[in-house]
Image (cartoon, helix red, strand yellow):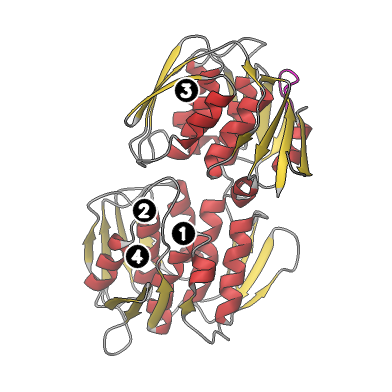
Amino acid sequence: MDKFVIAGNGPLRGVIDASGAKNAALPILCAALLSDEPLHVTNVPQLWDVNTTRKLLLQMGCAVDEPAAHEMVIDARPITTCVAPYELVRTMRASILVLGPLVAARGEAHVSLPGGCAIGARPVDLHLMGLEAMGAEITLEGGFVHAKAPKGGRLKGARIVFDTVTVTGTENLMMAATLADGETVLENAAREPEVVDLARCLRAMGARIEGDGTTTIRVQGVAKLHAAKHSVLPDRIETGSYLVAGAATRGCVRVNRTDPTMLDAVLVKLQQAGGKISTGPDFIEVDMQGKRPLAVNIHTMPHPGFPTDMQAQMMALNCLADGVGVIKETIFENRFMHAQELQRLGADIRIEGNTAVITGKDRLQSAPIMATDLRASASLVIAALAAEGETFIDRIYHMDRGYEDIEGKFSALGAKIKRVNKLI
């Protein structure tokens, strides 16, 4: 099993490019199921989760071409099955995103329930409630969701109110609504940039969508969608992770081909930590000017609040900061698993329910540690880069799910990081 060996060697400095956003690419690839004409997607990150989605589409019978790096062309016309098997779904919860498109375009879907998740429960009940409101018949049997469109084969427009904000639920029902009969209104909808990017793609395919980026999304159903080409937006979480790494190591990091408007909450916290922030239309730079970061308080919230996917990275920064930082996690109930691994590096962290209190230290000490989930893995890399000695990080397959060429990009910033396959 692959591991990272990381040697702390001073501030990170340099310039890298952001990749396409994983959390935008996955629903966009699933949106290809809505049309019998090809969808050409560019700026697709090369990640495990993207490859799993490709395998799922191929398993259904879709033609999936890869004409060049970071591009995919998906043609759902030859689809032969509307089944998403457990063998693929269990490795990636986002597989549930085929449910809405399949019911809307093919009249039925048989999708395995995603199962457990390391960072906490993420139930699909809101997805199912919304499809039922649109007339779908939903049954649960043998660990599968069986969904059928109403008689006539077409979903009906409906007003759907989410009792909690759900990104994948918003995306699933927005896709289903594009082919429904009449208007669908999604209330308390997720406002994340990835939802907006999906809406842009769907509009390029001929969908009629308004209000994306707000809490009320209106979709006027159309009879069919057509071919389109869409470029995936930059990954704001990847961007933020490298900026935090620069700040934690007292360095200067610039990320190009990104969008500063998607990271307002993170940039505010980096400024509070003492970073000098510079932005342009497609770049962000943080410069610590050689200074140790200051501790900051974090309260995770749905967009436009501070993203839960950046919580672990900021915890790593607080471990090295001057002062005491308090992090309150309000999105997931089990998202402090990285704290125990950071403590193995000498971090001073006290967990009280959904709150972590971190007293910063000038340096951490190397130790063998283990990644527990995708974003936790990034926090461990950041901490290891600022630790004395060599740190071994196990289970780095978590990183490959969401960070494209992470060792190459960190190496470009001066980090001493290498991937090895050895027992320790």
Mark 1 near mark 2, Cβ–Cβ under 8 Å?
Answer: yes
Residue 284 shows in the view: no
Q: Which label number is shown at residue 122?
A: 2
Residue 121 shows in the view: yes
Q: Earlier in the sequence, mark 1 or mark 3?
A: 1
Q: Which residue is mark 1?
A: 93
Magenta residue span: 8-14
Q: CA distance from mark 2 to mark 3?
A: 27 Å
Disc 4 packing (10 Å; few <14; some 14–19; many ≥20): many
Mark 1 vs mark 4: give the one in front.
Answer: 1
Mark 2 near mark 3, Cβ–Cβ under 8 Å?
Answer: no
Q: Is residue 78 left or right of residue 189?
A: right
Residue 103 coordinates in the image, percent (x, y): 38, 78
The three-letter code of the residue at mark 3 reads Lys
Q: Is residue 249 left or right of residue 174?
A: right
Residue 402 coordinates in the image, percent (x, y): 59, 48
Q: Is residue 229 left or right of residue 109?
A: right
Q: Between residues 86 and 23, which one lies in front from this camera angle? A: 86
